[in-house]
Image: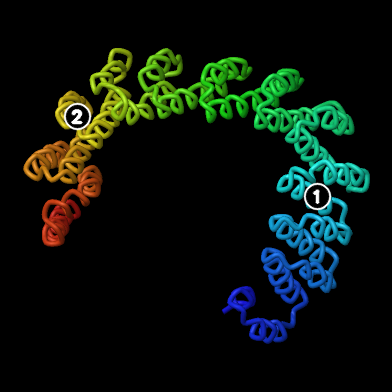
Amino acid sequence: MCIRDSARSGDYERAAIIQETLRAATTIAWAVTELASDAAQQGDPAAIQAALKISQPMLRNRALAQVTQGLVEQQLTIDAFAATTSISNPEIRVRTLLIIAAIDTEAAPVALAGAARLLAQIDESSRSSAIASLAAAYASISRIEHAREILLQLPPGEERDRAESRMALALMQRGMMSEALSIARAISDADERSWALDDLARLMAQQAIWHTAFELATEIDDAMQRERTEGDLMIAWARGGYPEQAQARALAIQSAGERLRVLIAITEPIAIFADPAAMQKPLSVLTNPDQRSRYQSAGVTALAMQGHFEEAQAMAVTIVRPFERARAFATLARALAIKGHSSHAQSALGVALREVAWLGRIETFTCLAWAAETLALLGGDDLLLSVASVLDELDSWWNG
């Protein structure tokens, strides 16, 4: 049992004994940190004094940061502020004040003001990150002017652009859409602006504000990133209950590879929310045999898992690539077996195995791996053992 476990179980005497056996200063500091952090999470302000006993400054600062978080989570914000006053490293102290602001919104203005006063003391190599975090924190409590003032401490260029991106996201999360969009669209660097718009578009999708999400995606400068973002939005749109609308939009994607990715991802929502016949619509666009077969295989899987067995089989028989056809029938067999349709499952599995039999050893063994669960459902351990025995013999033919 470790020190923390002993303490949590109430066996503080045992925890103390274990601690006394530790010799390495770093290990002792770690142990004290664990005990102090646990005490803070239990709402004990004495955790501050425990952390202050650590002799190494950096380890003590980190311990105090953990204690601060535990105290503020227990609504002991005054004690949490007291703990930060003993943190000697300005960067860690700023990060800790930001934690207070994030957890206790009522105390946020005081915490952020304290963090702002410390910025000048932070090492130049770390200051930019701290400024960006503080600006985002001010934005998250709707103090936009304060956030802008903080950002002015960064020189114009990439670092300020990145900080503005974080600020825009924080504003959007607060529901301040117009302010967030204004900042994101004004970012000077094209890459940073695109990343900000990507983040905002995805956030809009999470809130099911689809029109705005797609509108933002169209503003992304880089064509590949724009297409990827739009594709992800279509997938999310389909999963949100609008598969046919998403499918219609996906069919217009110019890149064949991206179009296939999105259409395959949409097959499951189509099977869940739409008429199974909608699964056939992309076939008029997917003229490449390999891409068409991959899509159909995914479509069969989606249909079969939703119990649309007739539609799944009808699609499976039209797949032109044998390996994908075998994959489709193997999936269909599994779905049938799960539903207790043993005879139909056996037939579908037989088709899958015949399709790969002439393709080669690797393809055959791959298909059997797909079929393992189905075999277990159909015949239990005995059937699996019998198949394994046959496999050993067949493998000796190939290797002979």
Residue 220 position in % (x across, y down):
62, 19
Residue 312, label in figure = 2
Which of the 4 image quarters holds residue 63?
bottom right
Residue that appears at 69% across and 55% down:
73
Question: With 26 as the anchor, is 396 left or right in this view?
Answer: left
Q: Quadrant of the C terminus?
A: bottom left
Question: With 252 as the anchor, is 343 left or right in this view?
Answer: left
**Residue furthest out toward the left:** 343
* Front residue of this view, candidates 125 and 82: 82
Type of amino acid at the residue the image marks with label 1? Leu
Number of the front mark, 2 or 1? 1
Spatial CA distance of label 2 from label 1 is: 57 Å
Residue 132 position in % (x across, y down):
79, 37
**Depicted 282 relative to depicted 122: above or below:** above
Q: Secondary structure at mark 2?
A: helix
* Front residue of this view, candidates 101 and 212: 101
* Front residue of this view, candidates 300 and 256: 300
**Depicted 264 relative to depicted 3: above or below:** above
Mark 1 sits on what residue?
A: 97
Type of amino acid at the residue the image marks with label 2? Ala
Applied colour scheme: rainbow
Residue that appears at 30% across and 23% down:
274
* Front residue of this view, candidates 74 and 303: 74
Residue that appears at 37% across and 22% down:
243
Question: With 100 as the anchor, is 204 left or right in this view?
Answer: left
- Crowding around mark 1 (Cα neighbors within 10 Å: few <14, some 14 to 19, many 20+) is many
Q: Quadrant of the N terminus?
A: bottom right
